[in-house]
Image (cartoon, helix red, strand yellow):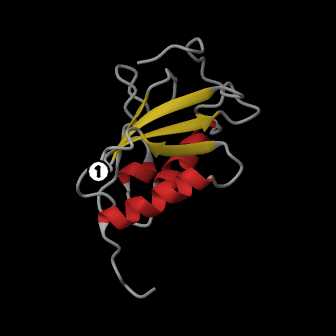
Amino acid sequence: MSGTVVPRNFRLLEELERGEKGFGDGTVSYGMEDGDDMQMKNWTGTIIGPPGTVHDGRIYTLRIHCGNQYPDQAPQMWFRSKVNMGCVDQRDGRVDSSKFAPLGHWKREYTLETILTELRRDMASPLNKKLPQPPEGHTY
């Protein structure tokens, strides 16, 4: 690796382009919450629950905030859809970085796609895959 540090806005533009084009199998997606947000701070994410779990077929939406220090600092994330997971604060849907390693041990190389994919993977973990869930359609 050359050691070149890509500036925040260029990095976010790359992520936006990838998010708009689509990637992977379509089980996670993301985009800007407001196309007029010139600072590119507020994003929305979607996760389709993994098969063979209590999350199977459910569609979860998230609010993502990329602060001024992103990607050097992790984004903040909140589920909008109610979900019962060990890393989610049940009061407001915040993904707790102390209970979700990809946020707690953030690396600059991680992307919004990385985090959403890891959250989906966490849904299928033994800790979370059978937890009783709130009724579909409920939000924080």
Give the vertical position of 134 relative to 68 (above or below). above
| Residue at the (46%, 63%) spot, across then down | 14
Q: Residues within 10 Å of mark 1 (few under 14, many from 20)?
A: few
Residue 93 falls in image quadrant: top left
| Residue at the (68%, 24%) spot, across then down | 54
Q: Nearer the viewer, residue 115 or 39?
A: 39
Q: At numbered mark 1, what does the secondary structure look like: helix, strand or loop?
A: loop
Q: Is residue 43 left or right of residue 117?
A: left
Residue that mark 1 sits on = 38
Residue projecting furthest to the bottom: 2
Q: Is residue 86 visible?
A: no
| Residue at the (52%, 23%) spot, across then down | 84
Q: Is residue 4 visible?
A: yes
Q: Nearer the viewer, residue 64 or 133?
A: 64
Give the vertical position of 42 relative to 7 (above or below). above
Q: Nearer the viewer, residue 100 or 5?
A: 5
Image label count: 1
Counting from the top left corner in percent of width and height, residue 58 is at 65, 26
| Residue at the (54%, 42%) spot, across then down | 119
Counting from the top left corner in percent of width and height, residue 2 is at 41, 88
Image quadrant containing the C terminus: top left
Counting from the top left corner in percent of width and height, residue 3 is at 37, 84
Residue projecting furthest to the front: 36
Residue projecting furthest to the left: 68
Counting from the top left corner in percent of width and height, residue 48 is at 64, 35
Q: Is residue 83 left or right of residue 23?
A: left
Give the vertical position of 35 relative to 90 (above or below). below
Identity, as a three-letter code, of the amino acid under mark 1: Met
